[in-house]
Image: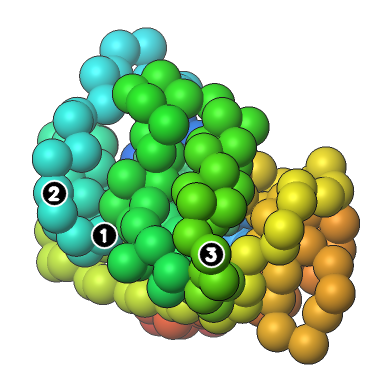
Amino acid sequence: MRLTVLEGQSKVVVMTEVWFASGNNGKINEMKMLLNRLINDGRVQLHHQGELPVFSAPPETGTTFLENARIKARALKAMKPGTWVFGEDSGLQVEGLNNLPGVHSARYAGPKAQDAENVAKLLKMMTLRPMPNRKAAFVSTIVAFDPQGTEHIFEGKLEGEIAKAAKGTQGFGYDNVFIPPGEQKTLGELGLAYKNKISHRAKATAPFIEALEKSVGE
Ligand code: ITT
């Protein structure tokens, strides 16, 4: 839905609803920051699935980030046709664990696992290997549907390595064990302003912002 807002008598700002198919507050918070220029100048209103009176998140049955992002975006698109809708699937791939937890990152320690339990399992799995390869990457895939229903795909990756112990309290998921290139500290210590400049999600969101700008006007 598009709302037209008159500012004084001279400027017309077109506000576009963009719906995010996510129930993860860490992701929603980051997306608000990443899209903040469009949000602050009134071109975009960012909403998420939790604002709907009724919404049942679909099971993530895909075997790839792309499939799962598409499943999430399609489910919300069915509720919000005619608007921009997007889903994001992301995860951590650790070289020494054959790229696990990968698409299972959210549920690595079990179906209802909390972040701390997933991190504990990851660190434990690393200690089970004598000389674990700590190289890792965060991956983000966004599937967006524009108001006409055309699908857009955006991807981003952040390479780094897994710390020997969790450190820092900022961010979510595996941020407190992920050390980006050239740093000694984890993303949990470095904080969100730092993370949003380099993250997998920021990289996937940059071309998404361009597509939104084309659609809503620069
Ligand atoms: P939605 O599907 O509702 O968006 P989710 O948490 O289930 O939320 P995913 O299925 O995409 O999302 O799983 C992503 C998991 O990967 C997430 O729960 C974290 O454990 C991890 N992860 C992804 N991006 C991360 C990041 O930026 N920092 C830390 N961990 C991240």
- Depth-wise, is mark 3 or mark 2 nearer the camera? 3
- Quadrant that contains the N terminus: top left
Q: Who is closer to the viewer here, 31 or 41?
A: 31
Considering every residue shown, the one lying at the far bottom of the view is 182
Between the residue at mark 1 and the residue at mark 2, the CA separation in whole angstroms equals 7 Å
For residue 145, above or below residue 166: below
Q: Which kind of residue does numbered mark 3 sit on?
A: Pro
For residue 123, above or below residue 56: below
- In this figure, which residue is indicated by the disc labeled 1? 65
- Quadrant that contains the C terminus: bottom right
Element at label 2: loop
Element at label 1: helix
Considering every residue shown, the one lying at the far front of the view is 130
N-terminal of the two: label 1 or label 3? 1
- In this figure, which residue is indicated by the disc labeled 3? 130
Structural crowding at the residue carrying mark 1, measured as other residues with C-alpha within 10 Å and reported as few (<14), some (14–19) or many (≥20): many
Residue 25 lies, in percent from the top left, at 58, 35
Q: Which kind of residue does numbered mark 1 sit on?
A: Phe
Q: Can residue 38 be seen in this view?
A: no
Element at label 3: loop
